[in-house]
Amino acid sequence: MSSLSRRGILSAGGALLSSTLIKGVSAQTLSVTTQEPFSFLFITDTHLQPELDAMKGCKMAFRAASQEKADFVLQGGDHIYDAMEVSLPRAHKLLDLYDMTEQELGKKVYHTVGNHDCFGVYAKSGASTQNAEFGKNFFRKAFGETYYAFEHKGVHFIVLDSVTITPDRDYEGRFDARQVNWLKSYLQTVPAGAPIIISTHIPMVTAFYTYADESPSLFKHQALSTVNTREILALLAGHSVLAVFQGHTHVLEQVEHNGIQFITGGAVSGNWWHGLHLGTPEGYMIVHVENNTVRTEYKTYGFHTVSPENTY
């Protein structure tokens, strides 16, 4: 599976529905200065697997997304379900399915690592921690580094790695020290006032705990948001951060903190391919950067689950 095949140029069709009728937070307008208008797609939490018609659903989403006028795709993580607790052959099978399906997009894809993209984390997988593909090495082999930056038409995109594997073979939301140092150094190279967009899988800032059933007390580690958010916010202070795009919780959500918009982008898989998750349907997000504003749309793509377990 070469990275070139993941970014193969193919085209396909599909019907789209506007999300503005579904959720009030599906469109936002944010202040920014750019050199040239453009659009990109934020597609997250595909959770591809052979079961639950997930491959069919993911193809439907990617074919619909391929028809959008967007320069590239920013993938928000959790490409597959699941590498954490399965054997390596199963994990490779899932990645092969994702690789084949992603070609439907026909666009350049920038990948964010998600917790489910890390191999053998849970002991029940039977994997050795000495395996060459253990943990994030599985992701790196497929997609490259877990944190990096790129520039597009005057906007600096920073893709962060929010997943830390704990010594007891679990995970938590955390930006490790090496990455924090890298981010500090990178931000020093960004011109004053230049707009920045960030991608992280596990949310940095979220209101999810206030309306979801998943209380932090249910988890051994802080898994639904990042532990050291304040450390990252301190580095971002004084920079023109347009927005932080987030995944993981499968909801549409916008929270503003200190002038930064934290936008959680729903999920292609909805409720893990079981329908609505807390009212959010299966979908993907279009981000328009134009006329000194950023406007987002969340679009559904007509998938019908074979095993409905809607939550609201």
Image (cartoon, rainbow, N blue to C red):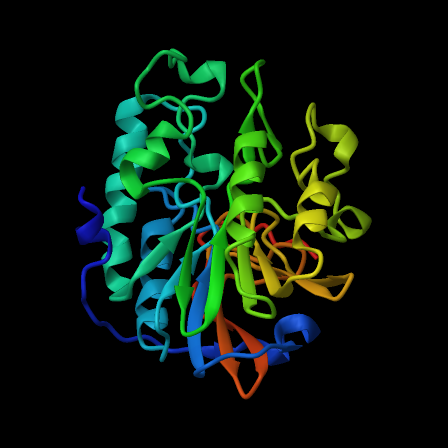
Q: Is residue 59 above or below residue 201?
A: below
| 4 horizontally vs 266: left or right | left
Q: Residue furthest bottom?
A: 291
Residue at 18% over, 65% down: 9
| 254 horizontally vs 110: left or right | right
> How far from the left and from the top, in percent, is residue 231?
70, 41
Residue at 64% over, 62% down: 239
- Give the quadrant of residue 295: bottom right
167 and 272: which one is in front?
167
Q: Is residue 46 above or below residue 240?
A: above
> How far from the left and from the top, in percent, is residue 178?
53, 32
137 and 90: which one is in front?
137
Q: Is residue 8 above or below residue 186?
A: below
- Give the quadrant of residue 170: top right
Residue at 38% over, 14% down: 127
> How far from the left and from the top, in percent, is residue 232?
66, 45
| 174 horizontally vs 124: left or right | right
Q: Could you tell me if residue 274 is visible in this image?
A: no
Q: Locate the C terminus by quadrant.
A: bottom right
Residue at 66% over, 40% down: 226
> How far from the left and from the top, in percent, is residue 246?
58, 54
29 and 188: which one is in front?
188
Q: Locate the N terminus by quadrant.
A: top left
